[in-house]
Image: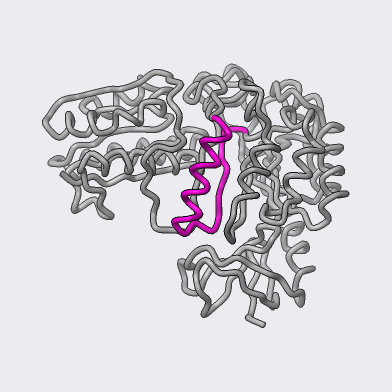
Amino acid sequence: MKVYIDSYGCTFNKADAQIMAGTLQENEIDIVDSIQEADVIIVNTCYVKLPTENKVVYRIQKLQKDFPDKKVIVSGCMVEIDPEKLEKIGPNCSWIGPHQLNKSADVVNGAYCGEIIRETGFSKESKVGVPKLNDGTLIHIIQICEGCLGACAFCCTRFARGPLNSYPIDDIVSEAKEAIENGACEIQLTAQDTAAFGKDTGEKLSDLIKEVANLDGDFRVRVGMMHPKNILNDVDDIIEAIKHPKVYNFIHLPIQSGSDKVLSEMRRGHNVSQYLDIVSRFRNEIPDLTLATDIIVGYPTENDEDFDRTVKLLENVKPSLIHLSKYQHRKGAISSSLPEIPRDVMKKRSKFLSEIKSEITEDENRELVGSYQEVLVIEKGSKGGFIAKTNSYIPVIIDDVELGTFVNVKITEATSTYLKSELV
């Protein structure tokens, strides 16, 4: 039997796909690179935004129509968040919930034999140290915890991922050690909120980062998204951990809005002043820090004054990476009961922020032109050449280098999303 996995969404979901692939392979089920070769197709869904929901719904429907002789299985967040819609668009599909990955082989075997098997519900099963099959890159993803401590009014992902479940530091370090010994040169520590790690077990994210970074080998560690409210009591120790020479000088710290009123209505659990204090403390200690943040444009209660506060925050903070999302209702989210703002207002605000975003990021990257950087070559570029990362996690395009090596380059050109370079 042969299986093709079509995966969408975040780094965490990508790791879920790797676990399913590893579990299937361990059960002597082949993973293939094309739908045409497959007997069974798994669509690993993301449901965080409406455009992604529409994309995966269309994909599931199209696969059933175009490949009636193949079995389609649905996994990922949609299984737990919106089973009603899933039942309508795929009444004959089997399901694998995000917490039931260890049952992937049973579901696939059953589907192949014509059964409809649906494994759903929450579990405390660890996702560390389990079989994984990656896509051949030198990047190894480790899920350090699942679920969160938040109650954000706009979020539906928490209904799929459940309450916080942190995995033991020793297990995470063991997986990282094995991955490095097998050639991985970048370890990505991921979660719905890495800053929540250990708040249910008494362990600390800062300790985890240091223990992974202290392993032998030439590699870098990237720490995933941190919720501001959960970093407040551990800022100094996390700063010290990020300062480790094997850790990228990078943090992903979403703010979502520059208005305290909107943050409160979003139920974010932090305010703008606290956010600015965290950023200031990081930048004082790590001058070449790359700060990534998220902004939701047009939250239902966002008025012109709230929007102006967001604009001023971005112009003041100047994040290196800004992920913009236009607000849209999500199934089960508290904010979905509120009337959305007019679409023309939403579009105008989004366009305005997009222009600010491009200006900020391009200006910051342009300052690096002419500088000399040590970069880690992590993957081949889709349009030729190779993609490397600076110590601040900025992507650099480079030619004629060896994957997995550290090289010295001169930055020759900058765009709003990446740098170009030449060997020195």
The residue at the point 72 percent across, 21 percent down is 265
Residue 73 lies in the magenta stretch: no
Say which of 43 and 288 sits in front.
Answer: 288
The residue at the point 78 percent across, 44 percent down is 240
Say which of 87 and 281 sits in front.
Answer: 281
Give residue 246's quadrant in the image.
Answer: bottom right
Vertical placement of 256 versus 401: above or below?
above
Vertical placement of 235 versus 3: above or below?
above
Residue 188 lies in the magenta stretch: yes
Give residue 70's quadrant in the image.
Answer: top left
The residue at the point 66 percent across, 75 percent down is 408
On screen, residue 246 versus residue 139, left or right, reads right
- Its colouring scheme is one colour
Q: Position of residue 65 (x, y in %)?
A: 20, 40
Whether residue 208 is visible, yes or no, is yes
| Count of numbered circles on the image | 0
Q: Position of residue 166 (x, y in %)?
A: 56, 27
Check the image and name the residue furthest to the bottom. 424
Give residue 61's quadrant in the image.
Answer: top left
Q: Which residues are magenta?
A: 168-193
Vertical placement of 230 versus 131: above or below?
above
The residue at the point 66 percent across, 36 percent down is 296
On screen, residue 12 versus residue 28, left or right, reads right
Whether residue 297 is visible, yes or no, is no
Q: State the quadrant of the N terminus.
A: top left
Q: Position of residue 137 (x, y in %)?
A: 44, 58
Vertical placement of 230 versus 324: above or below?
above
Say which of 52 and 110 sits in front.
Answer: 110
Q: State the quadrant of the C terminus.
A: bottom right
Check the image and name the residue furthest to the front. 216
Q: Position of residue 274 (x, y in %)?
A: 84, 31
